[in-house]
Structures are given as structure tokens and as C-alpha cells.
Image (cartoon, grey):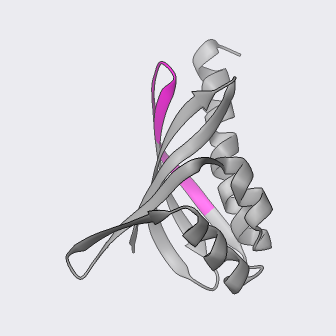
Amino acid sequence: MGKNNAKVTAILKAVELYAEAGRKGSREIGKQAFTEQATMSWVENGKITAVPISALYDGLEQTGQEEVTYEVLDVNIAGNVAFVRIDSWFSKLGSFNDMFTLAEQNGEWKIVNKIYSVK
């Protein structure tokens, strides 16, 4: 496997942990995907909102277990930072356009920011 293929696989591991956290309604799995300082952002009624990633964890726990699927649409890598775009579907919450920025930390890729829009 080439160097970039190995990076893509490692990057997508963080995205899969995000999806698995949704499937299980698990804060602990979510914490494996994101940095401690990560944020989540969206636009609602023309207003940009950004919150600590703990808001996502709270939502996962409140929603509980659900079906989650996603399709990777784009992966861009520049050194030790990356961008991933997916279309996701949560059986209880609906469909989303999710975009993640990631950074490599101690050989492991972590999500630094999640921004999304509702489909």
C-alpha cells in the first residue's frame, strides 16, 4: 500500500469512529475520533453556530443507538492535515452533508472540526 493510501485509510478510521459513535449512541467512541478541543459548526436561519464537540456527544447519547451509513465524497491531504467530505444518513436524525478537518497527532488522525448542513 502506498504512502497516500495508508494515510487515507488512517484518516477514514476517524470518520468510521464518528459513524460508529452514532450507531452506538456512544460518547466514548466519539472521543476516539475527535481531539479534545474539537468543535462542531452549522448554519441555521442564516446564523453560524459553533459549539464544543461535547454537544455532539450529548446528542449521540440522547438519541441512542440508530442505523448510520455514509458515503465518502472527497479526501484531501496536505502533509499532516486533511479534509474529508461525506454524505451521511442517521435513521433517527436524517441526512447530512458532513465536512471534517483532521490533523495527525502522534501518528493518529483526529477530527479537529465537523461542519454540517442538513440535506
User: Which quadrant of the view contains residue 92?
Assistant: bottom right
In the rendered view, would you say 117 is above or below 16?
below
Residue 56 image position (x, y, % from top left): 58, 69
Relative to 20, 79 lies left or right:
left
Residue 45 image position (x, y, % from top left): 23, 82
Quadrant the C terminus occupies? bottom left
Residue at 48% in and 18% down: 79
Residue at 71% in and 16% down: 1
Q: State yes or no: residue 41 in magenta.
A: no
User: Which quadrant of the view contains residue 89?
Assistant: bottom right
In the rendered view, would you say 55 is above or below 20?
below
Count the marks: how many?
A: 0
Q: Which residues are magenta?
A: 70-83
Q: Is residue 76 visible?
A: yes
Q: Nearer the viewer, residue 16 or 42?
A: 42
Residue at 51% in and 45% down: 112
Residue 100 image position (x, y, % from top left): 48, 49
User: Which quadrant of the view contains residue 76?
Assistant: top left
Residue extending farthest left: 46
Residue extending farthest top: 2
Q: State yes or no: residue 77 in magenta.
A: yes
Q: Nearer the viewer, residue 116 or 1?
A: 116
Residue at 65% in and 13% down: 2
Q: Is residue 98 visible?
A: no
Q: Nearer the viewer, residue 14 or 70?
A: 14
Principal secondary structure, stretch drawn in magenta: strand
Relative to 117, 64 lies left or right:
right
In the rendered view, would you say 78 is above or below 15?
above
